Image (spheres, helix red, strand yellow):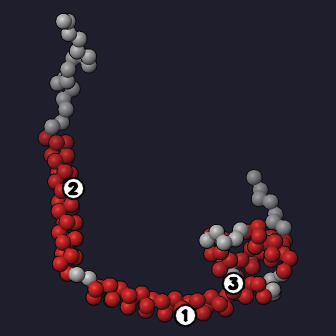
Amino acid sequence: MAEKELHPSIKQFKEFVRQNPKLIQQVRNGDTTWQELFEEWYLLGEEDTKWDPYRAENQEKQTTKEETNTGDWVSRMMTIVKNMDPEQLQGQITHLSQAIAAVQGVLSQFQGNQSGNTPKGNEGPGHPFSFRKD
């Protein structure tokens, strides 16, 4: 089945969205819908000041902010590590180790049962229901 040819205004809107990827984030965050964006774009045009926060130039500023935030993230992680109680951390590691050992024990039991006790064809009961007379 052949695809329908899109209306030229829809093609232009798609190109506008590709040039301004922050619009995609707005829709994904649930702040607006594609229909609302298209209607505003169609009525206002691409050059309206409404679109300034979404322009690609602002994207470069955002990248610089993200690099700064990465440095902040590292400093926050260092602060968290400094504030950790070593005894509490050791206790958590011990509990985790015990839980892993328990899971390994259960798995080894199942693996032992599978390899050693393979069911044979005629060892089961002859009839699935056992009827007894009183």
The residue at 86%/76% (across/down) is 43
SS of the residue at dot 2?
Answer: helix
Asked whether the residues under the numbered discs 2 and 3 touch, taking CB atoms below 8 Å apart as contact, a structural biologist would say: no
The residue at 80%/83% (across/down) is 46
**Where residue 13 appears, x then y in whole percent?**
78, 75
Q: Quick one: 14 or 70, which is closer to the camera?
A: 70
**Where residue 21 appears, x then y in whole percent?**
65, 79
Of callouts 3 and 1, the N-terminal one: 3
Amino acid type of the residue that numbered disc 1 sits on in the rendered structure: Thr
- Tell whether 66 sits left or right of 112: right
**Where residue 42 appears, x then y in whole percent?**
84, 75
Q: Quick one: 110 or 53, which is closer to the camera?
A: 53
For the image shown, how many numbered marks are present on the structure? Answer: 3
Q: Quick one: 118 or 43, which is closer to the camera?
A: 43
Q: Toward which corner of the image does residue 80 lie, by quadrant?
A: bottom left
Q: Which residue is mark 1?
A: 64
SS of the residue at dot 3?
Answer: helix
Q: Quick one: 83 or 64, which is closer to the camera?
A: 83
SS of the residue at dot 1?
Answer: helix
Q: Toward which corner of the image does residue 58 lie, by quadrant?
A: bottom right
Amino acid type of the residue that numbered disc 2 sits on in the rendered structure: Val
Of callouts 2 and 3, the N-terminal one: 3
Density class for disc 2 (Cα within 10 Å; few <14, some 14-19, many ≥20) is: few
Q: Which residue is mark 3?
A: 54
Of callouts 2 and 1, the N-terminal one: 1
Q: Which residue is mark 2?
A: 103
The residue at 17%/60% (across/down) is 101
For marks 2 and 1, give the CA distance: 46 Å
Asked whether the residues under the numbered discs 3 and 1 touch, taking CB atoms below 8 Å apart as contact, a structural biologist would say: no
For marks 3 and 1, give the CA distance: 16 Å
4 lies above or below 113: below
